[in-house]
Protein backbone atom coordinates (compact mmCIF):
# COMPACT_ATOMS: atom_id res chain seq x y z
CA UNK A 1 0.00 0.00 0.00
CA UNK A 2 2.79 2.40 0.95
CA UNK A 3 4.61 1.47 -2.24
CA UNK A 4 1.53 2.28 -4.33
CA UNK A 5 1.16 5.69 -2.67
CA UNK A 6 4.81 6.48 -3.36
CA UNK A 7 4.42 5.47 -6.99
CA UNK A 8 1.24 7.55 -7.30
CA UNK A 9 2.97 10.64 -5.94
CA UNK A 10 5.88 10.47 -8.39
CA UNK A 11 5.64 13.14 -11.07
CA UNK A 12 6.58 12.64 -14.67
CA UNK A 13 9.66 14.66 -15.67
CA UNK A 14 10.22 15.81 -19.25
CA UNK A 15 13.17 17.73 -20.64
CA UNK A 16 12.22 21.06 -22.15
CA UNK A 17 14.29 23.55 -24.15
CA UNK A 18 13.38 27.10 -23.15
CA UNK A 19 15.69 28.98 -25.54
CA UNK A 20 13.65 31.79 -27.00
CA UNK A 21 13.30 32.46 -30.70
CA UNK A 22 15.45 35.56 -30.52
CA UNK A 23 18.38 33.46 -29.38
CA UNK A 24 19.06 35.63 -26.34
CA UNK A 25 21.70 34.11 -24.16
CA UNK A 26 20.44 35.20 -20.77
CA UNK A 27 21.42 32.10 -18.86
CA UNK A 28 20.73 28.38 -18.90
CA UNK A 29 17.16 27.91 -20.04
CA UNK A 30 17.16 24.12 -20.54
CA UNK A 31 15.17 22.72 -17.67
CA UNK A 32 12.78 20.00 -16.65
CA UNK A 33 9.04 20.43 -16.64
CA UNK A 34 6.95 18.22 -14.39
CA UNK A 35 3.45 16.89 -14.38
CA UNK A 36 1.86 18.49 -11.30
CA UNK A 37 0.88 16.27 -8.42
CA UNK A 38 -1.60 17.05 -5.62
CA UNK A 39 -2.18 20.83 -5.18
CA UNK A 40 -0.07 21.39 -8.30
CA UNK A 41 3.10 20.39 -6.48
CA UNK A 42 6.23 19.73 -8.53
CA UNK A 43 9.92 19.34 -7.56
CA UNK A 44 11.58 22.67 -6.81
CA UNK A 45 14.08 22.17 -9.66
CA UNK A 46 11.33 21.86 -12.29
CA UNK A 47 10.67 24.67 -14.77
CA UNK A 48 7.07 24.98 -13.62
CA UNK A 49 7.97 25.24 -9.91
CA UNK A 50 7.16 28.68 -8.50
CA UNK A 51 8.24 28.00 -4.91
CA UNK A 52 11.55 27.00 -3.36
CA UNK A 53 9.70 24.58 -1.07
CA UNK A 54 6.39 22.78 -0.81
CA UNK A 55 4.10 25.48 0.68
CA UNK A 56 1.85 24.25 3.47
CA UNK A 57 -1.78 25.35 3.68
CA UNK A 58 -2.47 25.25 7.44
CA UNK A 59 0.45 27.48 8.60
CA UNK A 60 -0.37 30.04 5.90
CA UNK A 61 -4.00 30.25 7.04
CA UNK A 62 -2.98 30.54 10.71
CA UNK A 63 -0.51 33.31 9.98
CA UNK A 64 -3.04 35.19 7.81
CA UNK A 65 -5.58 35.05 10.66
CA UNK A 66 -3.06 36.26 13.25
CA UNK A 67 -1.88 39.13 11.07
CA UNK A 68 -5.52 40.00 10.35
CA UNK A 69 -6.38 40.12 14.06
CA UNK A 70 -3.36 42.32 14.86
CA UNK A 71 -4.16 44.64 11.95
CA UNK A 72 -7.76 44.93 13.11
CA UNK A 73 -6.56 45.80 16.62
CA UNK A 74 -4.37 48.58 15.20
CA UNK A 75 -7.25 49.98 13.17
CA UNK A 76 -9.40 50.17 16.32
CA UNK A 77 -6.58 51.74 18.37
CA UNK A 78 -5.79 54.29 15.68
CA UNK A 79 -9.44 55.41 15.81
CA UNK A 80 -9.65 55.43 19.62
CA UNK A 81 -6.37 57.31 20.11
CA UNK A 82 -6.89 59.49 17.00
CA UNK A 83 -3.51 58.70 15.50
CA UNK A 84 -4.02 59.18 11.79
CA UNK A 85 -0.36 58.66 10.93
CA UNK A 86 -0.64 55.05 12.13
CA UNK A 87 -2.20 54.20 8.77
CA UNK A 88 1.40 53.44 7.78
CA UNK A 89 1.67 50.62 10.33
CA UNK A 90 -1.83 49.41 9.42
CA UNK A 91 -0.75 49.22 5.78
CA UNK A 92 2.13 46.93 6.79
CA UNK A 93 -0.31 44.66 8.63
CA UNK A 94 -2.66 44.60 5.64
CA UNK A 95 0.17 43.65 3.28
CA UNK A 96 1.23 40.81 5.60
CA UNK A 97 -2.37 39.59 5.88
CA UNK A 98 -3.02 39.69 2.14
CA UNK A 99 0.36 38.04 1.47
CA UNK A 100 -0.56 35.00 3.52
CA UNK A 101 -4.10 34.81 2.21
CA UNK A 102 -2.51 34.53 -1.24
CA UNK A 103 0.05 32.06 0.12
CA UNK A 104 -2.69 29.82 1.49
CA UNK A 105 -4.44 29.92 -1.89
CA UNK A 106 -1.12 29.20 -3.61
CA UNK A 107 -0.51 26.21 -1.34
CA UNK A 108 -3.63 24.60 -2.86
CA UNK A 109 -2.87 25.81 -6.39
CA UNK A 110 0.89 25.85 -6.78
CA UNK A 111 0.74 26.27 -10.55
CA UNK A 112 -0.85 29.72 -10.21
CA UNK A 113 2.08 32.04 -10.79
CA UNK A 114 0.02 35.09 -9.76
CA UNK A 115 -0.40 33.80 -6.22
CA UNK A 116 3.31 33.00 -5.94
CA UNK A 117 4.51 36.34 -7.33
CA UNK A 118 2.10 38.54 -5.34
CA UNK A 119 2.85 36.65 -2.12
CA UNK A 120 6.57 37.07 -2.59
CA UNK A 121 6.44 40.82 -3.31
CA UNK A 122 4.01 41.66 -0.48
CA UNK A 123 5.88 39.46 1.99
CA UNK A 124 9.25 41.01 1.15
CA UNK A 125 8.08 44.65 1.27
CA UNK A 126 5.54 44.67 4.14
CA UNK A 127 8.16 45.21 6.93
CA UNK A 128 9.16 48.53 5.35
CA UNK A 129 5.77 49.96 6.35
CA UNK A 130 6.39 48.90 9.95
CA UNK A 131 9.87 50.42 9.76
CA UNK A 132 8.45 53.75 8.55
CA UNK A 133 5.94 53.84 11.41
CA UNK A 134 8.83 53.58 13.90
CA UNK A 135 10.50 56.60 12.29
CA UNK A 136 7.28 58.62 12.46
CA UNK A 137 6.53 57.61 16.05
CA UNK A 138 9.99 58.48 17.37
CA UNK A 139 9.89 61.89 15.64
CA UNK A 140 6.62 62.67 17.45
CA UNK A 141 8.02 61.34 20.72
CA UNK A 142 10.95 63.76 20.41
CA UNK A 143 8.61 66.63 19.54
CA UNK A 144 6.29 65.89 22.46
CA UNK A 145 8.94 65.62 25.16
CA UNK A 146 11.80 67.79 23.83
CA UNK A 147 10.05 70.23 21.45
CA UNK A 148 12.72 72.95 21.61
CA UNK A 149 15.73 70.70 21.10
CA UNK A 150 17.38 69.20 18.05
CA UNK A 151 18.29 65.52 18.12
CA UNK A 152 21.69 65.10 16.53
CA UNK A 153 21.31 68.53 14.95
CA UNK A 154 17.95 67.62 13.35
CA UNK A 155 14.56 69.06 14.28
CA UNK A 156 12.01 66.44 15.38
CA UNK A 157 9.74 67.25 12.42
CA UNK A 158 12.66 66.83 10.03
CA UNK A 159 13.57 63.43 11.52
CA UNK A 160 10.28 62.01 10.27
CA UNK A 161 10.67 63.64 6.86
CA UNK A 162 14.25 62.54 6.22
CA UNK A 163 13.93 58.96 7.41
CA UNK A 164 10.56 58.33 5.80
CA UNK A 165 12.05 59.43 2.48
CA UNK A 166 14.99 57.10 3.20
CA UNK A 167 12.47 54.31 3.75
CA UNK A 168 10.77 55.19 0.47
CA UNK A 169 14.15 54.89 -1.28
CA UNK A 170 14.78 51.43 0.19
CA UNK A 171 11.20 50.48 -0.68
CA UNK A 172 11.81 51.34 -4.34
CA UNK A 173 15.14 49.49 -4.47
CA UNK A 174 13.76 46.39 -2.78
CA UNK A 175 10.59 46.57 -4.87
CA UNK A 176 12.58 46.56 -8.11
CA UNK A 177 14.75 43.68 -6.89
CA UNK A 178 11.81 41.65 -5.62
CA UNK A 179 9.88 42.12 -8.87
CA UNK A 180 12.87 41.09 -10.99
CA UNK A 181 13.31 37.95 -8.86
CA UNK A 182 9.78 36.77 -9.63
CA UNK A 183 9.33 33.00 -10.13
CA UNK A 184 8.87 33.29 -13.91
CA UNK A 185 12.13 35.16 -14.54
CA UNK A 186 15.23 33.57 -16.01
CA UNK A 187 18.07 32.53 -13.66
CA UNK A 188 20.27 35.50 -14.63
CA UNK A 189 17.45 38.01 -14.10
CA UNK A 190 16.62 36.39 -10.76
CA UNK A 191 20.26 36.73 -9.69
CA UNK A 192 20.33 40.41 -10.67
CA UNK A 193 17.04 40.96 -8.87
CA UNK A 194 18.33 39.31 -5.70
CA UNK A 195 21.50 41.44 -5.81
CA UNK A 196 19.38 44.60 -6.10
CA UNK A 197 17.13 43.41 -3.29
CA UNK A 198 20.15 42.69 -1.08
CA UNK A 199 21.52 46.19 -1.72
CA UNK A 200 18.14 47.56 -0.65
CA UNK A 201 18.31 45.46 2.52
CA UNK A 202 21.77 46.81 3.27
CA UNK A 203 20.55 50.36 2.68
CA UNK A 204 17.60 49.81 5.01
CA UNK A 205 19.84 48.45 7.75
CA UNK A 206 22.26 51.37 7.33
CA UNK A 207 19.43 53.87 7.88
CA UNK A 208 18.24 51.87 10.91
CA UNK A 209 21.71 52.13 12.47
CA UNK A 210 21.78 55.89 11.87
CA UNK A 211 18.33 56.17 13.39
CA UNK A 212 19.40 54.21 16.47
CA UNK A 213 22.09 56.85 17.08
CA UNK A 214 19.37 59.53 17.23
CA UNK A 215 17.29 57.38 19.58
CA UNK A 216 20.27 56.95 21.94
CA UNK A 217 20.92 60.72 21.89
CA UNK A 218 17.29 61.37 22.82
CA UNK A 219 17.40 58.66 25.51
CA UNK A 220 20.49 60.10 27.20
CA UNK A 221 19.25 63.68 26.97
CA UNK A 222 15.82 62.83 28.36
CA UNK A 223 17.44 60.97 31.27
CA UNK A 224 19.92 63.77 31.99
CA UNK A 225 17.24 66.48 32.08
CA UNK A 226 13.76 64.95 32.51
CA UNK A 227 11.18 66.59 30.23
CA UNK A 228 8.21 68.54 31.52
CA UNK A 229 5.45 66.26 32.82
CA UNK A 230 2.73 68.70 31.74
CA UNK A 231 2.17 69.71 28.11
CA UNK A 232 1.57 73.25 26.90
CA UNK A 233 -2.18 72.57 26.92
CA UNK A 234 -2.05 71.57 30.59
CA UNK A 235 -2.43 67.82 29.99
CA UNK A 236 -0.31 65.42 32.02
CA UNK A 237 2.25 63.59 29.93
CA UNK A 238 2.73 59.84 30.39
CA UNK A 239 6.25 58.46 30.75
CA UNK A 240 8.38 58.38 27.59
CA UNK A 241 10.46 55.31 28.42
CA UNK A 242 7.98 52.45 27.72
CA UNK A 243 7.31 53.64 24.17
CA UNK A 244 10.99 54.28 23.46
CA UNK A 245 11.92 50.78 24.66
CA UNK A 246 9.12 49.34 22.51
CA UNK A 247 10.61 51.12 19.48
CA UNK A 248 14.06 49.72 20.32
CA UNK A 249 12.61 46.19 20.39
CA UNK A 250 10.71 46.66 17.11
CA UNK A 251 13.87 47.85 15.35
CA UNK A 252 15.74 44.84 16.79
CA UNK A 253 13.05 42.53 15.38
CA UNK A 254 13.29 44.23 11.98
CA UNK A 255 17.07 43.79 12.12
CA UNK A 256 16.69 40.04 12.88
CA UNK A 257 14.39 39.74 9.89
CA UNK A 258 16.84 41.67 7.68
CA UNK A 259 19.75 39.46 8.72
CA UNK A 260 17.70 36.39 7.85
CA UNK A 261 16.85 37.73 4.40
CA UNK A 262 20.48 38.62 3.73
CA UNK A 263 21.57 35.09 4.77
CA UNK A 264 18.81 33.62 2.59
CA UNK A 265 19.65 35.43 -0.63
CA UNK A 266 23.39 36.08 -0.26
CA UNK A 267 24.08 32.35 -0.62
CA UNK A 268 21.97 32.17 -3.77
CA UNK A 269 19.02 29.92 -4.56
CA UNK A 270 21.15 26.78 -4.81
CA UNK A 271 21.11 23.30 -3.23
CA UNK A 272 24.16 24.28 -1.16
CA UNK A 273 22.12 27.00 0.58
CA UNK A 274 19.46 25.29 2.73
CA UNK A 275 17.76 28.51 3.92
CA UNK A 276 15.53 29.27 0.87
CA UNK A 277 14.34 25.65 0.61
CA UNK A 278 12.90 25.44 4.14
CA UNK A 279 9.61 27.27 4.68
CA UNK A 280 9.92 27.08 8.47
CA UNK A 281 12.81 29.57 8.36
CA UNK A 282 10.61 32.24 6.79
CA UNK A 283 7.93 31.65 9.42
CA UNK A 284 10.28 31.76 12.40
CA UNK A 285 12.66 34.51 11.22
CA UNK A 286 10.36 36.78 9.19
CA UNK A 287 6.70 36.14 10.07
CA UNK A 288 7.20 35.78 13.82
CA UNK A 289 9.39 38.92 14.28
CA UNK A 290 6.93 41.06 12.30
CA UNK A 291 3.97 39.58 14.16
CA UNK A 292 5.70 40.29 17.46
CA UNK A 293 6.46 43.86 16.31
CA UNK A 294 2.76 44.47 15.60
CA UNK A 295 1.82 42.95 18.97
CA UNK A 296 4.30 45.15 20.87
CA UNK A 297 3.04 48.30 19.18
CA UNK A 298 -0.52 47.22 19.94
CA UNK A 299 0.24 46.80 23.66
CA UNK A 300 2.43 49.90 23.94
CA UNK A 301 0.52 51.83 21.34
CA UNK A 302 1.94 55.30 20.59
CA UNK A 303 -1.47 56.77 21.38
CA UNK A 304 -1.04 55.79 25.04
CA UNK A 305 2.03 58.02 25.31
CA UNK A 306 1.49 60.69 22.67
CA UNK A 307 -1.68 62.23 24.10
CA UNK A 308 -3.43 65.45 23.14
CA UNK A 309 -2.93 67.85 20.23
CA UNK A 310 0.52 68.86 21.51
CA UNK A 311 1.81 65.39 20.60
CA UNK A 312 1.30 66.05 16.89
CA UNK A 313 3.31 68.32 14.66
CA UNK A 314 1.54 71.67 14.14
CA UNK A 315 -0.46 71.73 10.93
CA UNK A 316 -0.24 75.05 9.12
CA UNK A 317 -2.57 76.27 6.43
CA UNK A 318 -1.35 77.20 2.98
CA UNK A 319 -1.83 80.90 3.79
CA UNK A 320 0.28 80.60 6.96
CA UNK A 321 3.03 78.77 5.10
CA UNK A 322 3.01 81.44 2.36
CA UNK A 323 3.18 84.25 4.91
CA UNK A 324 6.07 82.60 6.76
CA UNK A 325 7.89 82.12 3.47
CA UNK A 326 7.45 85.81 2.63
CA UNK A 327 8.67 86.81 6.10
CA UNK A 328 11.77 84.62 5.75
CA UNK A 329 12.41 86.13 2.32
CA UNK A 330 12.05 89.67 3.67
CA UNK A 331 14.32 88.89 6.63
CA UNK A 332 16.94 87.45 4.30
CA UNK A 333 16.75 90.53 2.08
CA UNK A 334 17.08 92.83 5.10
CA UNK A 335 20.07 90.86 6.34
CA UNK A 336 21.79 91.30 2.97
CA UNK A 337 21.07 95.05 3.06
CA UNK A 338 22.38 95.40 6.60
CA UNK A 339 25.53 93.55 5.62
CA UNK A 340 26.11 95.80 2.62
CA UNK A 341 25.16 99.01 4.44
CA UNK A 342 26.20 98.82 8.12
CA UNK A 343 23.99 100.66 10.61
CA UNK A 344 26.66 103.28 11.32
CA UNK A 345 26.73 104.31 7.67
CA UNK A 346 22.93 104.31 7.47
CA UNK A 347 22.68 106.74 10.43
CA UNK A 348 25.31 109.15 9.07
CA UNK A 349 23.82 112.24 7.29
CA UNK A 350 24.38 112.46 3.57
CA UNK A 351 26.31 115.47 2.16
CA UNK A 352 24.02 118.51 2.03
CA UNK A 353 21.45 116.72 4.19
CA UNK A 354 19.82 118.80 6.97
CA UNK A 355 19.97 116.59 10.04
CA UNK A 356 18.30 118.99 12.48
CA UNK A 357 14.58 119.85 12.20
CA UNK A 358 13.85 123.27 10.67
CA UNK A 359 10.78 125.35 11.53
CA UNK A 360 8.97 126.41 8.39
CA UNK A 361 7.40 129.92 8.29
CA UNK A 362 4.55 131.25 6.18
CA UNK A 363 7.14 132.51 3.69
CA UNK A 364 8.52 129.00 3.19
CA UNK A 365 5.07 127.53 2.56
CA UNK A 366 4.30 130.24 -0.04
CA UNK A 367 7.62 129.64 -1.75
CA UNK A 368 7.09 125.87 -1.88
CA UNK A 369 3.58 126.35 -3.22
CA UNK A 370 4.93 128.24 -6.24
Image (cartoon, helix red, strand yellow):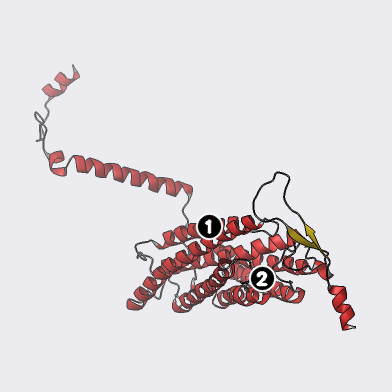
Query: Residue at the location (47% across, 78% down)?
Result: 245
Query: Residue at the location (53% across, 64% down)?
Result: 201
**Identity of the residue furthest to the top in this view:** 370
**Badge 1, how many Cα within 10 Å: few under 14, some, many 20+?**
some
Query: Residue at the location (25% across, 42% down)?
Result: 336
Callout 2 secondary element: helix
Separation of disc 1 and disc 2 at Cα?
25 Å
Residue 48, located in which quarter of the rendered image? bottom right
Whether residue 352 is visible, yes or no, is yes
**Identity of the residue furthest to the bottom in this view:** 1
Indicate the position of residue 302 as horizontal and vertical percent values: 52, 72
Mark 1–mark 2 CB contact (< 8 Å):
no
Q: Which residue is mark 2?
A: 72
Q: Is residue 79 left or right of residue 212?
A: right
Q: Nearer the viewer, residue 194 or 175?
A: 194
Q: Nearer the viewer, residue 271 or 49?
A: 271
Q: Dividing the image into 4 quarters, which one contains the C terminus?
A: top left
Amino acid sequence: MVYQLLVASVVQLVTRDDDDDAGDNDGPRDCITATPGPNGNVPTYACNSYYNFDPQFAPAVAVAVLFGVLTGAHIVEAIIFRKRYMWVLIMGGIWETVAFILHSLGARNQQNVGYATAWQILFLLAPLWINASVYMTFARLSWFFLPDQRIGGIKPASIAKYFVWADVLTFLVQGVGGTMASPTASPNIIKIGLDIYLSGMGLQQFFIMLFLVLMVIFHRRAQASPPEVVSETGEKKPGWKPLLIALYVVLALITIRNMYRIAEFAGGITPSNPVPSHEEYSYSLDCFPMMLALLILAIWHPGRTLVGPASEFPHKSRVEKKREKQERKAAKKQAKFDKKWPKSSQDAPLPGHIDEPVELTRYHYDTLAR
